[in-house]
Image (cartoon, helix red, strand yellow):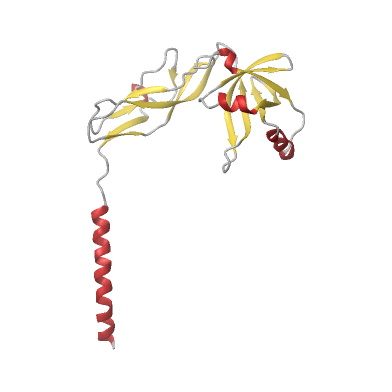
Amino acid sequence: MSTETDTKVVAELREQFGKGFARRLRAAGKIPAVIYGHGTDPVHVALPGHQVSLLIRRANALLELEIAGKQQLTLVKDVQKDPVHQVIEHIDLLVVKKGEKIQVDVPVSVIGEPFPGTIANLENTTVTLEVEATHIPQNVEVSVEGLEDGTHITAGELTLPRGATLVTEADTLVVGVALPPAPVEDEAEESEEGAEAEGDEAPAAEESAE
């Protein structure tokens, strides 16, 4: 888990905008970002690309920014990437304060193995929790160890981290244990055989037509 010193990032204020300027920033190894929230005007900054790209690998990353000598705690809300090259193009940061409660989507992590012959299907990959801004869990674990076919686990049945409150509807299906679908290879083979049989009959039909 990251320590506080890991999340300290020196950000540069920027007053130039547009795709061309953003492209030049990225070429220089920096990431354009905007900071908003708590009724403040949006603040546009440039972040050190390599450091930040490592920090935001975890969900709901907190960044302790230093901007022109001032400290600002922020939460990564959105990361925009180039769909082809997966280069980070822009980051949205939300102003947060220590001790305040915020709502975040936290990944669900399945552990254990269900009853032999069954599979565990993750129906919802995240659940929304209300947590302290400085105590955001990395994930919520759900065990499927030994669970049999037909078992359902809802959001309300999850064991939440200390201090977290569930925001997602309690009856939302999170994990379902079921038998794997029956193979359909036999049906495919039958259809192929039928097509071949029709192909064999076609010349005879043509001969009779003549």
User: For the point 23% across and 30% down, which residue is it?
Assistant: 115
Q: Quadrant of residue 86?
A: top right
Of 55 and 104, nearer the camera is 55
Query: Residue 58 in the image: x percent, y percent?
Result: 51, 25
Q: Is residue 182 left or right of residue 137?
A: left
User: For the point 24% across and 81% down, which residue is it?
Assistant: 204
Q: Quadrant of residue 3?
A: top right
Query: Residue 76 in the image: x percent, y percent?
Result: 58, 25
In this view, 39 is above or below 203:
above
In this view, 83 is above or below 126:
below
User: For the point 42% across and 31% down, which residue is it?
Assistant: 125
Q: Is residue 62 left or right of residue 205?
A: right
Residue lying at the far right of the rendered structure: 15
Of 65 and 103, nearer the camera is 65
In the picture, the quarter occupied by the C terminus is bottom left
Query: Residue 2 in the image: x percent, y percent?
Result: 52, 17
Q: Is residue 16 left or right of residue 101?
A: right
Q: How many marks?
A: 0
Q: Quadrant of residue 193?
A: bottom left
In this view, 41 is above or below 23:
above
Residue lying at the far top of the rendered structure: 99
Query: Residue 138 in the image: x percent, y percent?
Result: 46, 21
User: For the point 73% across and 14% down, which residue is it?
Assistant: 69
